[in-house]
Amino acid sequence: MPNRERCIVHRMRNKRKKDPIYIELKKKASSKEIYEYCHRQYLDEKAKAEKMLSKNYPCFVKDGKFIGATSTNAIEGGNWRVKYELRTPYKNKESISARVVQIGINESMKTFAGGKPTESFGSLHSSFTYSDVMNIELRKDMLVERYHYNTGSGEWYRSLDPIFQK
């Protein structure tokens, strides 16, 4: 894909495979020492990425801080878990919406899986909140790809609608 920014998490994973310090730590150090080393490396790389992205995408800078995404990791993981939990195609938009909300609530409860609240790496290093998603304002001037089900023929078809419709 031309003109795309590489995900910082995936870039760090690839870099770590060849990092001699990490390889040595993995042989001799405790998991806490390995975590601290990786954590410092990630924060340094994130700061560099945010500085570069702030220059390239000033529309995502608010109060001097870059607020855009630096990683696709949470999206990929969440997308995979939702698809796995759905397990079946739905014809009715309301039923799939309800099922996705149920999956999201169930997923959020895993924060307390060990009997106490824990904060994931993604949550710790992200500015993502569910309120951002729920308060999103959709642009009316964009084309939307929609899939429709024809009950008469029993077939799906695709259309591009110029505005969001209820």
Image (cartoon, rainbow, N blue to C red):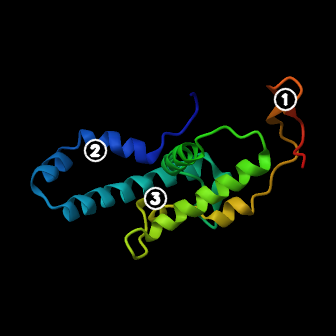
How packed mark 3 is, by other alpha carbons closer than 10 Å (few <14, some 14-19, many 20 or more), is few
Please state, as top left, top right, bottom left or bottom right, where the N terminus lies in the image.
Answer: top right
Residue holding disc 3 = 122
* Mark earlier in primary sequence (1, 2): 2
Q: Which of 153 and 134 is in front in this view?
A: 153
Kind of residue at badge 2 = Arg
Mark linked to residue 159: 1
Q: Which residue is drawn at 13% across and 58% down?
A: 29
Q: Give the SS element for disc 1.
A: strand
- Residue placed under numbered mark 2 in the picture: 16
- 80 left or right, relative to 61: left
Query: Do residues under tags 3 and 2 come within 8 Å of each other at their CB atoms?
Result: no
Q: Residue drawn 46% across and 67% down?
A: 111
Q: What residue do we see at 45% from left, 65% from top? A: 124
Task: Determine whether label 3 and label 1 are within 8 Å by CB.
Answer: no
Gap between marks 1 and 2, in whole Å?
44 Å
For label 1, the crowd category at 10 Å Cα-Cα, with few meaning under 14, some 14 to 19 and many 20 or more, is: few
Give the SS element for disc 2: helix
Give coordinates of residue 140: x percent, y percent.
87, 47
Q: Answer above or below: position of 161 versus 95.
A: above
